[in-house]
Amino acid sequence: MIFKRELKRNFKPFLIITFICSLMAVYVISIGPSMGTDIQKILDLKLPKQFQLAFGMKGLDYTSPNGFFALVFSYLYLFLGIYISGAFSSVVSKEFNDKTAEFLFSMPTTRTNIIFSKLIVVFLYSLLSIILIFLISCISMTLFINKSFEILPIVLMTLAWLIGGITFGAVGFLLSSFFTKGRTISALSIGVVVVMFVLQVIISMNDKLNFLKYICPFEWFKGSEINLTQELSITYILIAVVASILCFYFGIRRFKKMDVLI
Amino acid sequence: MEVIKISNVTKSYGKIKALDDLCLSVEQGEIYGFIGPNGAGKSTTIRLLLNFLHADLGGISVLGMDPQKDEVAIKKQTGYVSADTFMYPDMKVKELFHFTEGFHKINAAAKIKSLTDALDIDVNKRFEQLSFGNRKKVSIACALLHSPKLIILDEPSNGLDPVIRANLYELLRNEQKNGGTIFFSSHVLSEVQKFCTRIGLLKEGILIKENTSEEFVNVGYRQIRIESNNLPDLSKLKGVAGIEKKQNSIQFMYSGNPNDLIRMLGSVDLASIHIEEPELDKIFMHYFTDERKQNDI
């Protein structure tokens, strides 16, 4: 019952974010043929090299379709991070804010069951959204850029969205077990993603802060690096998986013991 | 069989003690009324029974089970109506019934029909379109549709019109006849008095009195109303409380020596005098007036 209910409840936000991200991907890819190598000149004029490095744009080959996908990667990573973090943070907190928690928790099922069902739905929508953006991007590259492209870096970048997005989601979920008030948790979950985005810029500008890259999901996966190496760092994947498991574990533990007071 | 057993339970919210060493038990088939002013700990007690809250100290047993360990088994046999009645606003009433049926893994079409008829519920409206009273009715129907063994209601008659209120109590009596136990909190004291088999009075987290409805009002006080053109001065009479004075009448609670009262009234030209057992709300007010007023009695 909860599964069906959550599928319905989360459908609109899923549709909106998938549409916006897909549109952005299609737009950037569509300007590829007309801009070509000029885009590097434009970027050099508009964006300092440190920023280009920070956003994973430095060293991209804009004569290839993969270069254009890598260009859009970091922006979609940011949008997807905000969406997934917000969706996971509202999994339980929304029940408290809408004051429906008492009704739901009075049903004959465990809190763990309720939370798991809700988390699975949010995970599925996040996955589906990322898969759709991937497919739409691939179709766009085929249609707009009359050149063949390598699929592996694009698959890896899509995986990076998922891994990084779920990490942000897990952090948002853990935070929501401390702050159940709607506005507070919304601001916090978005704030964490934005702060991390800014942090990657700061790290790329200051070598002394390099140690912070382990806590910054935007530093873990960069379009240009994935394009170049055609791999994802195992270390960062492990950090992401362990951090996500810990956040979900402690979040569920807190929600199970939490007083339901509305 | 004790359906509810609360043993020495203490619950605090930070520095505020909501329940202090509360002991209470409800037998199967009882209708137990839980009364007390706002903040007395009624809702906290109910939430502890449903595992919404966890006690700091003490033990709780519901239907012979532990609310924390046997949460699902207890909730399968329990119906709950909250005081504030919040459900999913975008769902139609029939969807809410279906949602509840799904959790209980039952098809309760016949029961839903009888409940919607008795409570006059429109199942095609969205929950957000309903007035507070109608929301309450939907909440009551959701709580009763699986014919629970224990029904817990927090201020159930709030927002209901008198006809629906009467129907609600009829429904609850039927559940009781079928072996159900009812535990509810209320501010409508006259209804608690009429409807409950036993009443508990909670004040600042402490159960200060528990008795049958009849015994509750038989506490040694009488309610006296006098009509006269020259009303007596009651200040010298011991055992007087709750004085309500109007132009040509005076009403008060009296627990003193009847001879003293008659002697004093001998000097008064009475138009009429009424001596009766006090209603529950008078008793309630007696227990919840401040210490100074209580000492007057």
Image (tube, coloured by chain):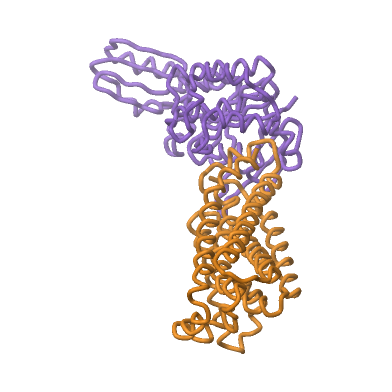
Chain colours: A orange, B purple
Quarter of image, res B62: top right
Above or below — where is A181 with respect to B53? below
Left or right: residue B147 compared with residue B233: right
User: Is residue B264 among the parts visible in the rendering?
Assistant: yes
Quarter of image, res B111: top right
Above or below — where is A82 with respect to B214? below
Residue at the top extreme, as displayed: B271
Of residues A65 and B127, the one nearer the viewer is A65
What x and y, as percent, mark residue A214? Answer: 67, 77
What x and y, as percent, mark residue A58? Answer: 58, 83
Looking at the figure, which quarter contains the N terminus of chain A? top right
What x and y, as percent, mark residue B283? Answer: 48, 26
User: Is residue A200 among the parts visible in the rendering?
Assistant: no
What x and y, as percent, mark residue A75? Answer: 54, 70
Tell me which residue sits at (60%, 19%) in the image: B197
Of residues B106 and B24, the one nearer the viewer is B106
Above or below — where is B251 with respect to A103? above
Q: How many marks do you count on the picture?
A: 0
Tell me which residue sits at (56%, 40%) in the image: B41
Of residues B49 and A231, the one nearer the viewer is A231
Tell me which residue sits at (68%, 54%) in the image: A252
Residue at the front extreme, as displayed: A146
Of residues A14 and B278, the one nearer the viewer is A14
